[in-house]
Image: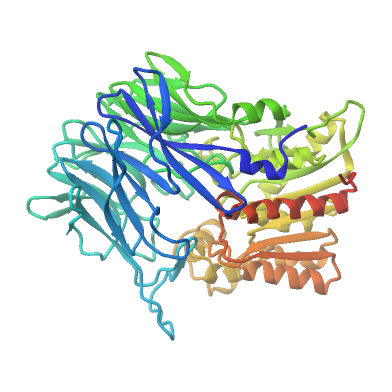
Amino acid sequence: MGLKVEDLEKLIFVSDPKISHEGDKVVFVVTKPSFSDNRYYSKLWIYDLKKDENFHLTNGPSDFSPLWGESSKVFFLSRRTLKEEETGLELWEVDTERCTEPRMILKLENSFETFDYYKGKLLLNLTIPKKKEDPTVIEEVPFWFNGKGYIYGMRNTLYLADAENGNLERLTEGKEEISFAQFSPDGKEVVYISVEDHQKPYRTDIKLLDLTSGEIKKLTKGQFTVEDLAWNSESSAIAFRAGDFSHGINSNIKLWILDVSSGAIKKLTPDDWDIGNYMNSDTRGPSSPGKLQWDGKWIYFPLNEGGKVSLLRTDLDGHTERLVDSNVTVEDFSVINGTVALTLMNSTKPSELYIHKSGKLKKITGFNDELIKNSKLQVPERFTFRASDDQEIEGWILRPANFKKGKKYPAILYIHGGPATTYGESFQHEFYALSESGFALVYMNPRGSAGYGEAFKDVRGKYGSRDFMDLMEGLDYAVKRFNFIDKNRLGVAGGSYGGFMTNWIIGHTDRFKAAVTQRSISNWISFYGTSDIGYYFAEDQIGGDLGKDLWNDDLIKVYWDKSPLKYADRVKTPTLIIHSDEDYRCWIDQAYQMFTALKLKGVQTKLVIFHGENHDLSRKGKPKNRIERINQIISWFREHLQTEKK
């Protein structure tokens, strides 16, 4: 047996651990999908390190983003008094030691984030949406964003919220996009990440706000794309994770240190290290922003190394220690005095809470243990092969759940999105559902994937060439090595970049008996003008250097030559197209164009549209839609790869 599609409802997502200032308690989020209500329920839990016990702190139904205040108080965001159709968010407070009901501090019609707390004040990032108007008048780019809808004219603003009465004090003018902020340890300043040029949201700056004078100082000059940051205890230096555009917008994220007084910036990690977590998984709960922490002399950070994500720390002299370095993916973490609360997952175990202390790693929760034990999952088998240019490529094969030696099985080549993400030691419910349905899965990290160095990751101008070769050569290797794969019953699937590559593959080979393309790109020219990131992503990845003129005839030819739609007349593979009608990352026009072209060419094609969902359907969509999506995929492959129907 294995995990069935409907077992998604049995999985528990553990996320966002926050360790108390005293280091004696950890608050974390526990999330569970519900098919009957078609939503996710989330509660806050507490782990007491001294008593070695954990218990739920709140009853939900939608509590997340915990943040420690003074002593035993925890602040959190929630929608507990809001109806499903209502907009807005609430800020609540709960005492971890007293048996009292949580208290609501603030309720707003707008969305907001909580970033930090200092002596009775909470640092909030408040977004004020545009009022609906008819007709809609748009005068700027970008005009929409995946998961948010129309964003033209929207700006977010930093506020201080009084932790007692919820009164708000405005800190910034609302003329910039703010993605992360933090109090200085002495409480005198706030550092935040800002985008001033909204047409170039990938170019961010670090700004320093003096809370006494209101003066704002820019500490960088647009040379980075900054992910997050962390102060040292003396309020004199800031560590930050950022790319430097050395390889375009997909440059590795490196660790940097900024001296506040002098403005000097120093790189702390090698260029080929990718400081972050770019692992694919469909079993994640809500998480707060920030994957970087400064504790004493040490800066703690995640490192994406091929098919795993490790936890490391370094000091300013470059002395680096590996704290968690096994075949796992480190998800969220927080640190106090060397004690780390973190969530970990691997390819056979969903995320759970762990404590790392004095060099030892201890598992705390086991919400998913019984389900995983009873499911008796196949363990993905790692393999490597040498591509035709002698580059080593890493991949995995997942056998069918009821695998029997000597039997041949259909196999699906599954391609990840990005392309700058990765497969590896992360839990994928969808993969196990496909395995339980009788399919073998082959998946790998071709050129363009994160975690293998910048040269490996940089596929600008090479879409559909070197990456395509890696995938085909990897599949050849897998078919030859794993003799249970039936080479005459192969399918291909992928989403986002993986959808683009699926579209590309079926226009360049007939070896696959069926294809499933999801939230895909079929036409780079229309993608340029319709995607929320298209006008700069396509320029960087397909057109070459930023700033080139799209209306140059030679460049138009480059875009069209790299578009799968150009090769639709060659396609013979039966193709299922899955798309969401509120996907603004890869707008639904991409699906319409591919569907129309294949239908007019007589290819067996089906288009499935999920209404009200966006680009994140497979990871964060409504539970019923998520299982229906997987059922559509299984049904298509069963029909065309001729597996036995159950």
Left or right of 273 on screen, residue 375: right
Which quarter of the rendering shows the C terminus? top right
- Total numbered labels placed on residues in the image: 0
Is 385 located above or below residue 566 in the figure? above
Is 43 located above or below residue 633 in the figure? above
The image position of residue 140, as x and y in percent, is 38, 74
Left or right of 532 on screen, residue 561: right
Q: Residue at x 40, y 59 (%)?
A: 82
**Nearer the observer, 95 or 335:** 95
The residue at the far left in this view is 213
Q: Residue at x 71, y 57 (%)?
A: 517
Is 181 located above or below residue 322 in the figure? below
Q: Looking at the rendering, which quadrant does residue 589 occupy?
A: bottom right
The residue at the far bottom in this view is 135
Q: Looking at the rendering, which quadrant does residue 154 occupy?
A: bottom left
Q: Is residue 225 visible?
A: no
**Nearer the observer, 286 or 56:** 56
**Nearer the observer, 125 or 10:** 10
**Nearer the observer, 601 or 146:** 146
The image position of residue 205, as x and y in percent, is 29, 52
The image position of residue 425, as x and y in percent, is 59, 31
Q: Is residue 367 visible?
A: yes
Which quarter of the rendering shows the N terminus? top right
Q: Residue at x 24, y 49 (%)?
A: 123
Is 197 located above or below residue 11 in the figure? below
The image position of residue 530, as x and y in percent, is 54, 70
Left or right of 257 on screen, residue 602: right
